[in-house]
Each structure stands twice: as C-alpha cells, then as structure tokens.
Amino acid sequence: MTFRNGLASLLRPEDSVLVLIDHQPYQLTNINSHDPHMVVNNSAGLAKAAKAFDVPTILTSVLADRGGLIFPQITNVFPGQEVIDRTWVNTWEDENVVDAVKATGRKQLIIAGLFTEICVAMPAIQAAGEGWDVTVITDACGGVSLEAHQVSIQRMIAAGCNMMTWFALVAEWQRDYRRTKTGPALVELLKDHLAGSGMAYLWEQQLLNTPVPTSNAGGH
C-alpha cells in the first residue's frame, strides 16, 4: 500500500480539477445518508470554492431529460457552462468527460456526486487505477443509505482514493492567509455555506463596528 503523506500530497488549486457528478433532483429524492439540504449546501459551497480558486470544474449529469437538471445552486456558479449529459452510469467511461478533464493538464482529480456508492465510486476507483490522484469530497455526496455511503467510502479508500470534506478542501487550497486574493471569497463562503462560522464572523464585525459608549449609564 502506498501511503498518501508529505507536503506534496496536499491539494493545490493550481493542480486540481473538480468533477461534479449527477447533483440532480431524481438522485436527491433518495438521499438517506445526509440531510438533503446539507448536500445542496455543501455541493454549492464546493462549486463556489472551485471558482474562487480558479479550479477547472466539469459538470456532468446522467439522462437529464428524466432525472432533472443539475441543481441551479451549482450551475448558477458557472453561467453558460455546458453540462455534459451522459448515458454511462460510470462517468469515467464517458469520453467527453475524461477528455475535458485531461484537457486541463491537471492530475489532482476531485470528485463529488450522487450517489456515493454508484456514480462516485465507479469513476473514483477507475481513475485511481489509471494513475490519477483522486480525492472524494464526502459531504458533497450522498447515498441511498448511511451504510451504502460508508461502505463505498471504505471501498474507495481500499482502491487508493483520498477522502475529504468540502471545507477541509477549501482550507487546503488556501493554506496561507497571506494569499489575500481569495480572502473575500472565503468570507462569502463562510457567510453563505458554513452557518456557525459565518454567523460568528458577522457578529464579530458587528461588535468591531459598535461604538464604545463615552459615558456611563448614570450620566456621571
């Protein structure tokens, strides 16, 4: 087994390419491993992060005329971008998707989608076997049951894939607070998609902008 460790194993925006797979209404109706609202929130946050860090993002659906269009929370991040619609259940057997990924010239392949155990596991396992550095963003995925989601994660780890959550990926891409270019986008991500930290940030700003009283309540 090859261990994934060392500085070079951390994800870098300049080496990353993101593939978002089948975030569609039909799949969402049978997500039971996660709160469906959280899946939409996390996948939208992931999409916005990729755009903020200039990470090429490929959007793909399966039989969209039956399963529905990709969530607008994702497609609105990339207005006008073509969504590759497939007949293949396994995204990595669709030449259009694979060619789009290869055209980026990047080898850190990041995947999220619905369902974890089917439309994520198959391309992740195949791509890892072909030498890609594969990372799956588990909380922007979802399975038909908690067991299905968890077993597929174990299966992908055994195949050599890396597992992360969406905001851990954002932190890894950022890495250094001196990278101020992406600072404003990170603040917006906190506010819109990471409720606790986002509200704490807004509260902090409120407190910092609250004038300090110049006299005591008694007027003395």
Image (cartoon, rainbow, N blue to C red):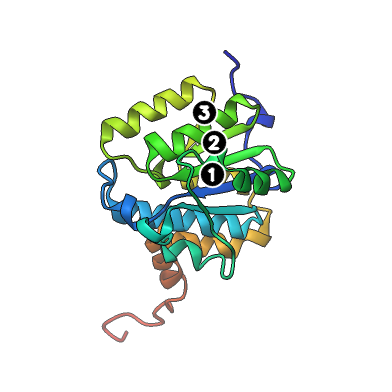
Nearer to us of marks 2 and 3 is: 3
Q: Which mark is residue 28?
A: none
Q: Quadrant of the N terminus?
A: top right
x and y percent of residue 195 in the render?
36, 58
Secondary structure at badge 3 equals: helix
Seen at 50% across and 64% down, the residue is 75
Residue located beneath label 3 in the image: 125
Q: Which mark is residue 135?
A: 2
Residue 115 appears anywhere in the view: yes
Alpha carbon separation for disc pair 3 and 1 = 20 Å
Above or below: residue 155 compared with residue 13: above
Mark found first going from the N terminus, 1 or 2: 2
Q: In whole angstroms, how far apart are the C-alphas of marks 2 and 3?
A: 10 Å
Figure quadrant of the C terminus: bottom left
Give the mark, 2 or 3, whose residue is nearer the N terminus. Answer: 3
Q: Is residue 69 above or below residue 3?
A: below
Considering depth in this image, is 12 or 206 the residue closer to the camera?
12
Q: Quadrant of residue 109?
A: top right
